[in-house]
Amino acid sequence: MAEQRHVLTRDSPWMRARVLLDREVVSRETVAGALEHRLFGPEVDRGRFQRGCDYAADAGLAAVVCRPEHVSIAARRLLGSSTATVTTLGFHDTTRLQDPADLAAEALELVAAGASEVALVVAPGLDRQGCLHLVQEQVEAVVDAVAPAGGKVRVMLNTTDTSKEQMTECTALVGGLGPSLVQGGSFRGDRATFSQIEAMRHCLPDRVLLKWTQPLRSVEMMLVSMALGVDRFNGDIPALLESAKRSTRIAPLKLPVHGVDF
């Protein structure tokens, strides 16, 4: 008996459903509004920083991420735009063991200087339960300090040398402490996997945004990540916006459907 093969054609019920399925259209403005401009590198001098802020505001980017000493400049350049000023607490301290009270005091100073949002970097793989206890105290102290002044807090999880269990446990913990955004990824540049992204999104309340550290390589990867629940991205912003512009000339950008398109 000849082997029967199941061939999917456009007339197959599954294919008809796939074609007819509504997919959310993503505009170039939506792409821009999900990108954050990283302007904290040592190569960014004052002139380059000011030009970067102006570009971010004109392009409608989500945020400028800058060094603490540049917060007041960013706040002035971005005034009246939808682009947020974001900076990192303990910028020059890589131990991740800062005293919660010191972090809270620094956060208040930065919000007073014009920061819309302050970021706290944590490393879940440092010391298991002892680390998680410190992380909780740090996040609570910073949130309690800046919330009355209208400041927001994001928590950046450095997932280097972190197991999936540690990552999800820490994500679930900090997600319930009042941050506006949780960011995950390795600072060594390791590529993210879809399973890591899905695990973090699953642990977070819907109101908490998710960002992945590693820069995007294409608009197509951005759309897939959006479909998995990622809200904010790094990447080559001019190239990504130009790619989105070219793509929309041919056909609308659409979010793929998880489980159907990928």
Image: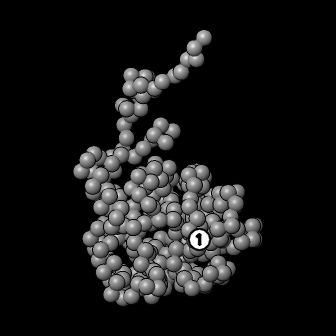
On screen, 55 above or below 206? below
Asked whether the viewer can see residue 136, the reply is: no
Q: Nearer the viewer, residue 227 or 153?
A: 227
177 with respect to 83 (left or right): right
Residue visible at 46% across and 26% down?
Answer: 8
Tag 1 secondary structure: loop
Percent position (x, y) of residue 258? 49, 42
Q: Is residue 7 above or below residue 137?
A: above
Residue 230 visible in the picture: yes
Residue drawn at x 41%, y 25% is 9
- The residue closer to the viewer here, 232 or 221, is 221
Residues packed near mark 1 inside 10 Å, few (<14), some (14 to 19) or many (20 plus):
few
Quarter of the image for the N terminus: give it. top right
For badge 1, the amino acid type reads Arg
Q: Is residue 8 left or right of residue 245?
A: right
Q: Is residue 175 above or below residue 250?
A: below
Is residue 243 shown left or right of residue 176? Answer: left
Residue 79 in picture, x, y percent from top left:
30, 77
Q: Residue furthest top?
A: 1
Residue 52 in the image: state x and y as whole percent: 33, 78
Q: How does the figure colour the protein chain or chains?
A: one colour
Q: Residue at x 33, y 48 (%)?
A: 253
Q: Position of residue 96 (x, y in %)?
A: 64, 78
Count of numbered tags: 1
Q: Residue at x 58, y 71 (%)?
A: 187
For label 1, the residue is 188
Residue 56 falls in image quadrant: bottom left
